[in-house]
Image (spheres, rainbow, N blue to C red):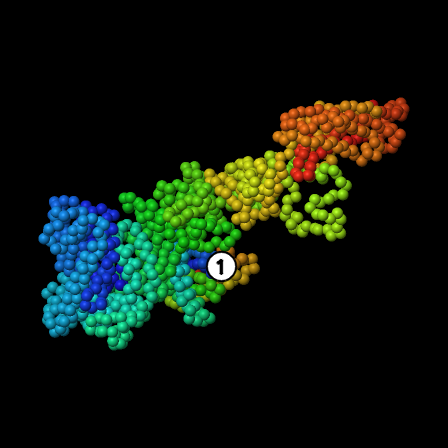
Amino acid sequence: MAVCVAVITKENYPLYISNIPAANELKFHYTVHTSLDVVEEKLSAVGKTASDLRELYLGLLYPTEDYKVYGYVANTKVKFVIVIDSSNTSFRDNEIRSMFRKLHTAYTDVMCNPFYTPGDPIRSKTFDNVISSMMMQVC
Amino acid sequence: MTDPDYTQCAEDHQCLLVVVKPLGSISKGNFSCVFDKISSVEQATLQESHRATWIRYKQYYPPENNDWGDFQAHRRVVGLIAVAESCDSQELSQIFESFDGLRGEYGTSLYNWRMFVFGLTGEVVDQNRTDVDFVSDYEQLGGITRTVEEFTSSLFIVLESKRLDRASEKAGDKMPLLCVPFEKKDFVGLDTDSRNYRKRCQGRMRKHVGDLNLQAGLLHEALVNYHIAVETLRSINDFLWLAAALEGLCVASVVSHYGTTCRTTKARHQGASTQAEKEKRSRAGMQEVLIDPGSLTTNGIGGDPSLEIGRAKNCLSPDDIVEKYREAISFYGKYQQAAVIELEACIKAVRVLAVQKKRSEAADFLQNAIYIHVDVTEDERIQRYSVLSELYEQIGFRRKAAFFKRISAMQCVRAALPEPGWKACYELLLDTLQGYNLSLDNPQSSTESHHGWPAVQLRILHELVYSSQRMGNPALSVHHLTFLLHSMLDFLSEQEKKEVSQILEKYAANCRGHSTALEIREGLQVQPIALSKLPIIRSMKIINLPPNLRPVKLKSGDGLSTPISSSSPFIYSPIVVQQRREQRANQIDFQWVQGDVCEVQLMVYNPMPFELRVENMGLITSGVEFESLPAALSLPAESGLYPVTLVGVPKIPGPVTITGYHTEVFGIPSRCMLQNLSHCKVMCSTVDVVPALPLTQLTTSLPRCSGLIAPSTLGDVCCNVVVRLFNGETQKVSVQLENIGKQPVESIELDVTYSQQQRDSGTCRVTWDTQELQKLIPLQPGSLVDLTLSIHANFDFSNTDGSFTEMQDGEGIVRRNVSFLTLVTLYNPFFIPATWRKGDIVVTQVVRLSVRPSGHQHL
């Protein structure tokens, strides 16, 4: 079950972070912030080999004791990070990929909103609903 | 083995370990001098061959670690140097005793030992101990170097002999089983003749020989030996030693690929590990050094090309190095007691990978290293996290490095510590700021997009403030809190804004904010922060003086009718030079007067959710001297644009430029420069100040009129007085002229303006005596003179339409009425600057008297 979802711009500041449970938010802030290092590393590494055929799904960024952190980068360098509880081992790679795809489409919907300025924090209810459905789908 | 050595790198495997210890009453400074001198001997050579071995020196090494010397040869202490200072012979015998005790601690692993005794002169030199050197004073450190070189050569000789001993053992001989300390009891009572056992012995011995070869500088042989050991041990599944052999293989390959260029810089920084000491090692980048076959003349392989082949055959490729390290560490992981070895291996691997620039693998290794549970004391946790953070920094993972630095800072001040190290905590936190994208030098303005994570940055800033407060440096904590308030203003909630401002006020009450650059630590200075958001200034405008005080330029003295501009030689020119519109719009076409109170208007906005009290708000100017009179104001919560007027008095004539303003909010003084404010609109900020002009005041004893007639021009200060005259009457009106300024009045001109009606009908005349007027000037400051005006009324009753009304009384008699004239005199009762002499242009302010009738008549 996803415990934290974050959307990060290409300047590496967060547009949206939400987590369940709502307590201990700062810890997730820290986790996502440090995982950016790994994301950047992967981006720069792959960029050397084939610049156009880059895969969007980055996979497991790093495991910690309690959590696993997965990353996904869109072509506009917008990063999505999902933190998953390690106790839930039944998550397969495909399921994570589908979660990211849903996240990506929800994000593009937010972008399509003509009243939304890129760079502002995301405050859309639809987006919130999609996220909470992802976070509570195994409950 | 209890404490891991975080400073190890892969090249340490080829070094001989020598321990240098102080004895007796030697002082720390002296000892470190001597230690530096000793450590400068890093290589030991033999006379006959050109090989060299490396030496590393440590000041503290627990004897238990020595027991692992069989496992990995570089862990064994092979040399002991003691440094002592003594003044008399009793102490000397004590020192000798302690030296022997030390030797005993390290047991049989020592190849050789030496002692240096300082401070004794001639009388006890005839000791019969050959291993003790007496040096008379600290100036003769050169001799020590020579002794140490001899000492290290002797170590090398012993090493060589051991190596040759071991290498010459044949495979069939009975050899002892090398063990690690926790394994010893496992092998009691085991059958010593089984094939398994013999293979185990052989494998372990091979690995040991490989170690010795590596130390002796024979890379090729070391590689061969390691390969054999790996084969042997893999077949019998002796995991611990297999892992050690793999690690040795990796190390040898690393050395042969990259050389040992980092040795010299590293050795100098090895010293006693103190609490929270951050070892700033600036390594020269290790490049891949291809070993020239011609230069390697090991005995046995004398520079022939077969070395190159041998190297290619046995040496691992860089990718293989990573693989083997991974394998080795996973094998180490099977043994709980080998946790320290595992940790050190991880750290070494990370260093190697950092050089190879394989960052993600290095991150994997480091991640693994975090989870190895080593039983460390509280003090060492700090060092552990510091080292982790440094390694992350080397890989280039800045954020993780900042994260771990913060953790180690928190460890410094844990509650369980008897004496929390707030200063160390503060220093560590300062270093984390860069990783979180915070820069103390320039707080970002709100218009740019904020870089970084607000929640995390807020947390770090709060911790910085708290630790600097506890550290006992209130100026720093005030500065940091100001920084927090200024740069994070947009991200604080309302509650937080209130809290932060209250705390800031409390701190600032104890220690006012600084106004010059503050030095945080060596080499790092911060400028005081300009709180330009509290309040926000939206626009600034320079206001002209009130109309009655404005200086007016007069034409030059002879009063030509055509205006001649003094700068151009042309009398008439069809070309009219026009100033450009926008220039004219931006220039100010009025002047300020020296000595007068001049105003600047600012529109301010208060962004805080509570009432903001601003004290001591004034202008900062450049140009001539300008004395700014401070104002205090109190702005309601989150209120819109307020006009605020700041006043000042220019003291010297010349151009004045408004460059900024200063305020004091929450007890913190701040100076904001207008050029730094991007959200503030300024039309023009330079005004000319003209020299002081005299001020005059007119008063009269005539009764005032109750506001019947509006002033003729807007802004004129006027005072309406009434004089009643009969037709044909002349009345003398006395007006007092007082010079209330500081300059003498040099000329007075009186000019009377009649309204249109009166001009036509010529009903009223105001005259005065010009001679009398001339006698009045110059009017000194403070003097009061009388001016007499005579007013003569002359109404023409022949023209009766509309100027007065007929009134009829009850009898219907139309009478000829007597009309009264009301005389309204307008003049400025306040300050009038009268002359301004600048070159040949004379400026005079006129006293304007304007006369109007009122069609007023009554019986």
Please say if B699 is above or below B839.
above
Q: Quadrant of the N terminus of chain B?
A: bottom left
**What chain letter is assigned to the residue under label 1?**
A
x and y, in percent, of residue B256 in the image: 28, 69
Question: Where does residue A97 sit, x and y in percent of width and height?
Answer: 42, 66
Q: In the image shown, does B318 or B635 lie closer to the viewer?
A: B318
Nearest the camera: B485 or B331?
Answer: B485
Residue B290 position (above or below residue A35): below
Q: Look at 63% across and 28% down and name the residue there.
A: B781
Q: Nearer the viewer, residue A123 or B207?
A: B207
Picture quadrant where residue B158 is located: bottom left
Tag 1: Cα neighbours inside 10 Å, few (<14), some, or many (≥20)?
some
Looking at the picture, does residue B169 appear above or below residue B567?
Answer: below
Horizontal side of B673 relative to B165 (left or right) equals right
Q: Is residue A94 left or right of residue B715?
A: left
Q: Which residue is mark 1?
A: A127
